[in-house]
Image (tube, rainbow, N blue to C red):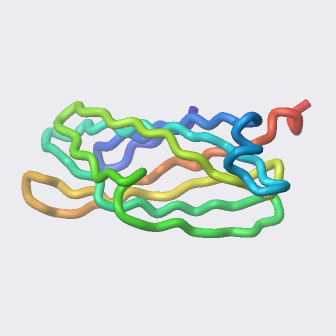
Amino acid sequence: METAITNGVKISVEVNYQPTTNRILGSEGEHIFAYQVTIENQNSFAIQLLRRHWHICNALNMRREVEGPGVIGEQPVLSYQGKHSYISYCPLTTEIGKMYGSFLMKNLEDDSMFRVDIPEFLMILPETLN
């Protein structure tokens, strides 16, 4: 599990290869990795996640970016010490890759905006490590 704390918000990411969903979700030659993100508000004020920005890199150094509102269709509000978790997935055409990024958050006390880092995490086909 990878973890980072930025501006009073703790982000933890855990990733797992999904061999059974590969045939369902992925195209031929794609590997599907599921990842769970847990967001913990350690600030003394409530926050709201407004946007996400992901950088996805494969083993051939092909890069793509994914940007948009919220996460999986939601813009969650987290009170002090509140948590929000979600699971999503990433298809890769190589056996190794990585993701990292940021969330745009809103301080609900004064309406200011701030960024929170999503720690870099690796996606590696289990057989690759043997």
Q: Quadrant of residue 45?
A: top left
Residue drawn where x is 37% and y is 48% of the image:
6
Q: Does residue 2 appear left or right of residue 33 in this picture?
A: left
Q: Does residue 77 appear left or right of residue 129 in this picture?
A: left
Q: Residue furthest left?
A: 109
**If the image is split into quadrants, where does the C terminus sit?**
top right
Vertical placement of residue 56 versus 16, above or below: below
**Residue 9 position within the rendered picture, expressed as x and y whole percent measured from the top left:** 32, 43
**Residue 50 position within the rendered picture, expressed as x and y whole percent measured from the top left:** 29, 59
**Residue 44 position within the rendered picture, expressed as x and y whole percent measured from the top left:** 14, 39
**If the image is split into quadrants, where does the N terminus sit?**
top right
Q: Quadrant of residue 22?
A: top right
Q: Does residue 25 appear left or right of residue 87 in this picture?
A: right
Residue drawn where x is 42% and y is 51% of the image:
72
Q: Quadrant of residue 113?
A: bottom left
Residue drawn where x is 66% and y is 34% of the image:
16
Residue drawn where x is 61% and y is 54% of the image:
99
Vertical placement of residue 87 versus 102, above or below: above
